[in-house]
Image: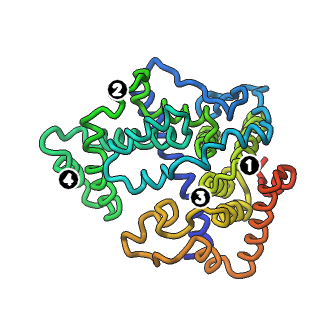
Amino acid sequence: MNKRTIQLSVVATSIVVAATLALTTLLVNDENPTQSPRAPQRGVTPATRDVAATPETPGASAAPVESIEVVHAAAMTLSEHRDWLRGFNESMDNFALAQELVVAGKAGDARAQLVLGRVLLECEIFKRSIAQYKQGTLAERAADDLATRPYVSERSRRNLLRQVPRCERLLAEDPFAGHDLPDEARGYRYWANRALESGDPLAVMERAVRSIAGRGATSEAAKDPAFRANLLSDVRHVAFSGDAVALFSVGGVLSHPSVVADPTYGYAWQVAACEMGYDCSKQNPAVGFGCTEDGTCDAGETFLDVMQRDLGAVKFAEIYASAQDIEYRITTNDWDGLQQYVQIKE
């Protein structure tokens, strides 16, 4: 593994999220051709247009700046909720998980809302991947789909087959039965929007990824100030939430070549997230991407181990020093000091 591999690994989370969000948009448009999704708000402040969903026009306004108190209030439930992301990663029955998430989501747990959206999305994608096969059990239909794709990697094959027990009950039963919810609550976009409106930091970073994807290769000068201001607003929101999972995503965004010229500070945000509690071991599927199950990596190795080995001790020491400063400035609510680590391309 070399520096190029490091660059690919640290932005992989953002790329995966961007691909998923692109697919979500396609599915939403397919399911609701005449319905426009609600424009989610940034935390609890007035909304600004999502640049991934709405074309920018000259003079588009930037997101208003939230007070630190508002950001902290939006993140209050994060210290109390269950680790829904881990539950999702380990789930073998998304129906049972969805039943729990509905209850928590209705009660205002923003992370539960976000994960419920992911649960519904995963099984919707799986359902569509085997839709052309009408006969046999779910497992047999998945096997029929794989038989038409002999060059699929073993990891992808395993992941598809894993969806069978995860999604079988959810595709056959209704986890929303008995709940007083609108019809659109059976779709993943409803819960993703609820999480964003509730100020969930990870949902905020997913919006940032959408914005990057929507920005494309445009050279419109009038669009850049709003993009920059909105991205800074999202990073600020996440930074002061203290959510290590979302902070790791900040690092992915700030390592993306369409956002920054030099990914070094993006690496530092990733390291800071690891130091603040994010699971940076290869056993975390968002870091190792299933390599421990494949037996292709050392299960005891961490993201920091790989970075130090491949970038060298001197470069890693520089990144680690920046990460320590980022962590300090987060804990002291020093946004002015943090902005030196958010070097967005002009």
The residue wearing badge 2 is: 178
Q: Which residue is mark 4?
A: 143
Residue 116: name its quadrant. Answer: top left
Q: CA distance from mark 2 to mark 1?
A: 37 Å
The residue at 36%/30% (across/down) is 176
Which residue is the extreme one toward the front? 80
- 255 to 80, vertically: above or below: below
* Element assignment for label 3: helix
Quadrant holding the N terminus? bottom right
Cβ atoms at labels 1 and 4 below 8 Å apart: no
- Of the residues tagged 2 and 1, which is closer to the observer? 2
Camera-nearest label, 2 or 3? 2
Q: Amino acid at mark 2?
A: Gly
- The numbered mark, 3 or 1, whose residue comes first in the sequence reads 3
Distance between mark 3 and mark 1 Cα atoms: 22 Å
**Disc 3 marks which residue?**
11
- Work out whether mark 2 precedes mark 3 in sequence or the reverse, and give the earlier one: 3
Mark 4 crowdedness (10 Å alpha carbons): few <14, some 14-19, many ≥20: some
Q: Nearer the viewer, mark 3 or mark 1?
A: 1
